[in-house]
Amino acid sequence: MRRNRNMPIVLLLGLFLVLFLVILAIKHIKVYIVFSSGLGPFFLVALIILLMIVVFLKGL
């Protein structure tokens, strides 16, 4: 089995995603999270996950 050479980038993006979600949760936690945080964070999370998948598949 070959080692994925882009794994450090995927791990870094994953760490950034977790950190972003924690900070976002601390800033915006209310009873209605969806309404208080807007759509911007959801697009950013989706973009980071998509970038992680693309980088991971490129390394295979």
Image: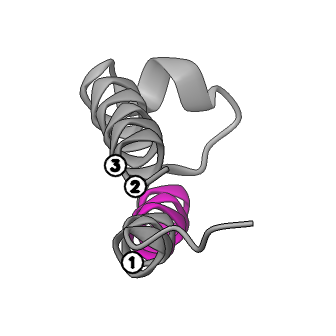
- Give the mark, 1 or 3, whose residue is nearer the N terminus: 1
Residue behind mark 3: 55
- Give the mark, 2 or 1, whose residue is nearer the N terminus: 1
Q: In terms of depth relative to the viewer, which is nearer, 47 or 33?
A: 47
Q: Residue furthest front?
A: 1
Mark 3 element type: helix
Q: CA–CA distance between discs 1 and 3? A: 11 Å
Residue shown at 46% from the left, 39% from the top: 53
Residue shown at 49% from the left, 75% from the top: 11
Disc number placed over residue 59 in the picture, else none: 2
Magenta span of residues = 15-26
Residue type for callout 2: Gly
* Residue mark closest to the camera, 2 vs 3: 2
Residue behind mark 1: 12
| For residue 44, side relative to residue 31 (left or right) | left
Dot 2 and dot 3 residues touching (CB under 8 Å): yes
Q: Where 36 falls versus 22 (above or below)? A: above
Residue 52 lies, in percent from the top left, at 41, 48
Residue 54 lies, in percent from the top left, at 36, 36
Residue 12's image quarter?
bottom left
User: Local crowd at mark 1 within 10 Å, few (<14), some, or many (≥20)?
Assistant: few
Mark 1 element type: helix
User: Local crowd at mark 3 within 10 Å, few (<14), some, or many (≥20)?
Assistant: some
Predominant secondary structure in magenta? helix
* Residue mark closest to the camera, 2 vs 1: 2
Residue 32 lies, in percent from the top left, at 64, 26
Residue 34 lies, in percent from the top left, at 55, 21
